[in-house]
Amino acid sequence: DQQVKQNSPSLSVQEGRISILNCDYTNSMFDYFLWYKKYPAEGPTFLISISSIKDKNEDGRFTVFLNKSAKHLSLHIVPSQPGDSAVYFCAAIAYSGAGSYQLTFGKGTKLSVIP
Amino acid sequence: EAQVTQNPRYLITVTGKKLTVTCSQNMNHEYMSWYRQDPGLGLRQIYYSMNVEVTDKGDVPEGYKVSRKEKRNFPLILESPSPNQTSLYFCATKKWGQAPDGADTQYFGPGTRLTVL
């Protein structure tokens, strides 16, 4: 059962416009949500995160929104730039009492920003 | 410079020939993990280690072994590789504990592309 879902495998956006990447989750025990960015031939790199007690976190051009009731989060990139073209992974963290840490990734969305 | 290194970066091998992919980090991180990335399946965790001599299974551990004899190294071992283990493998590390701001991130290595014929 997939706990973190990215239902759009790909997205194309014009340079300068807004990119919106979506993610849904099923596990209500997730404590944090993260977005990773991955370029070809490189490992994923951390982009932005949000705690489950917040509904918005902003870092420059990147904003993540969390709607806990809908179990949905989204990443907004404004304005989109060609260098943003990459695969974006949504991920979620659950901590348990024994110090266990679970990081679960979605399948990724390939963003293409067209000049 | 903080680094996670993997070797080899590319490997073509044959079914049944034992191989090891090494992972080394210089950040003194307690937590290390292995993932595989497959088209349409995203990143799936194979094994993880919370500290030296402590390892546990992730979501897809079958056909893999790991060891954590020292903090900086976390090798991934395929005792008898099969074609369904053809994949892109990533090692990742993180400092143990919860970050107060939620930026509890893992640092990923550059990846190892493995082909099993």
Image (tube, coloured by chain):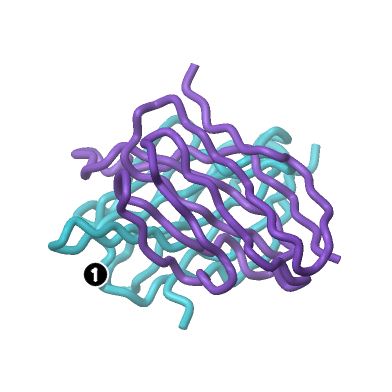
Chain colours: A cyan, B purple
Q: Is residue B83 left or right of residue A24?
A: right
Looking at the picture, does residue A49 appear above or below residue B87?
Answer: above
**Rendered image quadrant of residue A95:** bottom left
Looking at the picture, does residue A3 appear above or below residue A36?
Answer: below
Q: Residue at x 57, y 38 (%)?
A: B109
Q: Residues within 10 Å of mark 1 (few under 14, many from 20)?
A: few
In percent of width and height, residue A103 lies at 39, 58
Relative depth, front residue between B46 and B97: B46
Q: Residue at x 74, y 50 (%)?
A: B113
Give the quarter of the figure containing the C terminus of chain B: bottom right
Q: Residue at x 34, y 61 (%)?
A: A102
Relative depth, front residue between B15 and B44: B15
Q: Is residue A10 left or right of residue A71?
A: right
Relative depth, front residue between B16 and A105: B16
**Rendered image quadrant of residue B19:** bottom right
In percent of width and height, residue A33 lies at 36, 55
In percent of width and height, residue A65 lies at 37, 54
Q: Residue furthest top?
A: B1
Q: Which residue is mark 1?
A: A29
The chain letter under disc 1 is A
In percent of width and height, residue A80 lies at 63, 39
Q: Residue at x 34, y 74 (%)?
A: A70
**Label 1's element?**
loop
Q: Is residue B41 left or right of residue A101?
A: right
| Amino acid carrying mark 1 in the image | Met
